[in-house]
Amino acid sequence: MNAAVTLYVPGDASACSLGADHVARAIEAEAIRRGRAVRIVRNGSRGLYWLEPLVEVATAAGRVAYGPVTPADVDKLLDAGMLEGGAHALRLGDISTHPYLASQQRLTGARLGVVDPTSLVDYVAHGGYVGLRNALAMQPLDIVRAVTDSGLRGRGGAAFPTGIKWQTVHDQKAAQKFITCNADEGDSGTFSDRMLMEGDPFSLIEGMTIAGIAVGATQGYIYLRIEYPHAARALAKALVVARAVGYLGDDILGSGKRFDIVVRLGAGAYICGEETSMLESLEGRRGEVRVRPPLPAIKGLFGQPTVVNNVVTLASVPVVLARGAQFYKDFGAGKSRGTIPLQLAGNVKHAGLVERAFGLTVKELVYDYGGGSATGRPVRAVQIGGPLGAYLPASEFDTPLEYEALSARDALLGHGGVVVFDDRVDMARMARYALEFCAVESCGKCTPCRIGSARGVELVDRIIAARAGGNGASGAHDSNLALLNELCDTMFNGSLCGLGGLTPYPVRSALRHFKEDFLSGARAHLPGARAPH
Ligand SMILES: Cc1cc2nc3c(=O)[nH]c(=O)nc-3n(C[C@H](O)[C@H](O)[C@H](O)COP(=O)(O)O)c2cc1C
Ligand code: SF4
């Protein structure tokens, strides 16, 4: 039989939802029928989702991509010589030269779509574990200092400096410390954690191991939402491999240092992404926010000093240790250093993952990468930073995507999700949606959030009813709007955690930038002018 041709068909959840499993099976079946030997690698997605399932073939001249491929295309593709990189309408050539990818600055996601996610050989061949080897040759405090000097801030949402958090845990005297990875990824329109765990799980494992060595922790936990079964499988396989060859365990690479990781599945409540709720859930209790202080860094999991970091934060650490703090810090703008994997979703032509240094503008992201709305209608708004993030109108699309610039506009970057809406969006309904989301997901511990969000939904319902009834500018209507603003003040100032405390961001930004939607019924008559439910 002829030598096997290697093909890459993503096993990423998004690609699979678009039929990648069927495509892989069709290629295998058709190759057997033709007497051709093929080896199919289920890689992660490159993050160009409109081209998924994106199949790549390893040819003598390099990898050649085809996409989006359906099972019905497979026969014709093989006829066209796909296994040798032959010409076909779906042929995209070397996908790494595609402008969407070539213009990115992939540091954390450099291996996404490139490697076999569960092959340690592949990981090491593509620069993996250099960071850990460097870390093992350093004093723990020097590792912490490198992370501090890199300017890395938490990518889970709060953007807290990672080095300072690690320093606090390092400085605690305790018999047991923990590294916990927050892989709950509850924000709407976000998927970078998932992509990293599915497409490059060793980068997270390496980052957690470096964190453990830096702060003196020997046990790590990955808190993963149960809706991510592909990530759970990739992590489980990678953990077995890492343990088998001594990258985890009692004597990491012969250093005498000990560290291991287990995965715990969360049932998928948004509040379990809040770090103290996550710790409660990890301890086997209902996910409910803890009062702070004490901080988790001082008294966290099982009462021990605990690092809580997001997947992207931890997966960025190997880059810092492998290439140096200054290398990482040289990317970015202002106090936002390094790169951020932005996740472009919603009503946009080219949804996907865009990793760039901080500072790319909303306009560049939505138009240069996203190609505008999928419907071809004008883009009216984007929501940045998940369900608790502010809406920005088109007039503010020159805003750079970095922490301080967004904060100056009463917005936040959160986990880097950007959801696009066209001109049919009804912003009063989006404000209602934010409050309803908060009401549904509230842990119930504090009154402003538990009661305030429910009253907020009723209030917006009254505003929408008055608007539709044509008396959208009456005295009662004005007082409802004033009351809504007051309610936002109470939730913002009085909530115990970010769920209740940040819900005012989408509500207020909708009121501020799109007031006309609250005053007249015009928008409600547009086709499709509804919030998702
Ligand atoms: C309601 C709520 C939900 C959150 N969800 C997540 C989440 O899904 N993933 C995450 O990493 N951080 C989430 N966070 C932020 C965490 O509380 C915490 O700041 C983060 O995990 C710390 O890691 P980092 O410093 O690496 O960002 C959430 C915060 C709040 C208030
Ligand atoms: S703000 Fe909401 S989610 Fe947070 S502690 Fe209060 S009730 Fe719980």
Image (cartoon, rainbow, N blue to C red):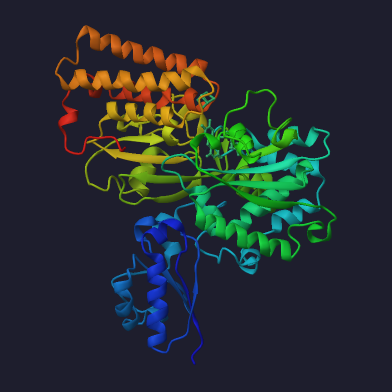
Q: Is residue 425 visible?
A: yes
User: Residue 61's x, y, as percent?
Assistant: 47, 77
User: Residue 461's x, y, as percent?
Assistant: 27, 22
101 shown above or below 459: below
State the residue at coordinates (29%, 12%). 480
State the residue at coordinates (62%, 46%). 328
State the residue at coordinates (30%, 73%). 73
Residue found at the far top of this picture? 475
313 shown above or below 91: above
Residue found at the far right of this picture? 256
Residue found at the far front of this picture? 285
Most foreground residue, 168 or 354: 168
User: Residue 159's x, y, as percent?
Assistant: 57, 33
| Residue 19 horizontal side relative to residue 122, left or right | left
Most foreground residue, 157 or 458: 458
Q: In which quarter of the image is the C terminus?
A: top left
Most foreground residue, 495 or 165: 495
Q: Is residue 54 visible?
A: no
Most foreground residue, 289 or 136: 289
User: Residue 411's x, y, as percent?
Assistant: 44, 28
State the residue at coordinates (57%, 30%). 288
155 shown above or below 12: above
